Amino acid sequence: MAKAKLVKRKRKKRLRLEGVATLLFTIAVVLYFGAKFGLKAYNNELQLKATNVAQEAANLKEEVSRLQNEVTQLQSRDRILSMVEDDDISVNQEQVVVMGEQEKKEE
């Protein structure tokens, strides 16, 4: 008697729905955590830059106010008159004209 051969059919591998879903879920989880940690690091970097810019702005405002005070002090009439008196120069009050007072006299 002849032996019967058992013939196995080669099955093509089919992608199962569960396998595809698992793969997509895994990719989604990896992307989620990558985006989460990447954005958190970027946010920390932006906060640090914002703090530095705010500190620099505060320093510049302080310097501007200091320079404004210095300009006011340097253009003070009393300071100029004291320098003139130190050099023994007499001040003729008729020749000294203050622009605000001159406009009032004309009116």
Image (cartoon, rainbow, N blue to C red):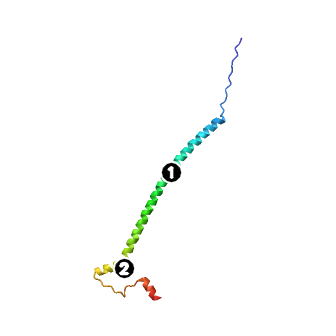
Residue at the right extreme?
A: 1
Dot 2 or dot 1: first in sequence order is: 1
Residue 41 is situated, as x and y percent measured from the top left of the image, at 50, 49
- Above or below, 94 against 65 in this view is below
Residue 2 is situated, as x and y percent measured from the top left of the image, at 71, 13
Q: Amino acid at mark 2?
A: Arg
SS class of the residue under badge 1?
A: helix
SS class of the residue under badge 2?
A: helix
Q: Nearer the viewer, residue 10 or 20?
A: 20
Report, in whole angstroms, how far the alpha carbon at label 2 lies from the one at label 1. 55 Å
Considering the image in quadrants, where does the N terminus appear?
top right
Look at 45% across and 57% down and name the residue there: 52
Which residue corresponds to mark 1?
Answer: 42
Look at 44% across and 63% down and name the residue there: 58
- Above or below, 31 against 2 in this view is below
Q: Amino acid at mark 1?
A: Tyr
Q: Are marks 2 and 1 in contact (CB under 8 Å)?
A: no
Look at 41% across and 65% down and name the residue there: 62
Q: Quadrant of the rendered structure where residue 92 is?
A: bottom left
Residue 34 is situated, as x and y percent measured from the top left of the image, at 54, 44
Look at 65% across and 35% down and name the residue there: 18
Q: Nearer the viewer, residue 92 or 62?
A: 62
Q: Quadrant of the rendered structure where residue 72 is?
A: bottom left
Category of crowding for the residue at label 2, using alpha-carbon neighbours closer than 10 angstroms: few (below 14), some (14–19), many (at least 20): few
Residue 59 is situated, as x and y percent measured from the top left of the image, at 42, 63
Which residue corresponds to mark 2?
Answer: 77
Q: Nearer the viewer, residue 1 or 26?
A: 26
Category of crowding for the residue at label 1, using alpha-carbon neighbours closer than 10 angstroms: few (below 14), some (14–19), many (at least 20): few
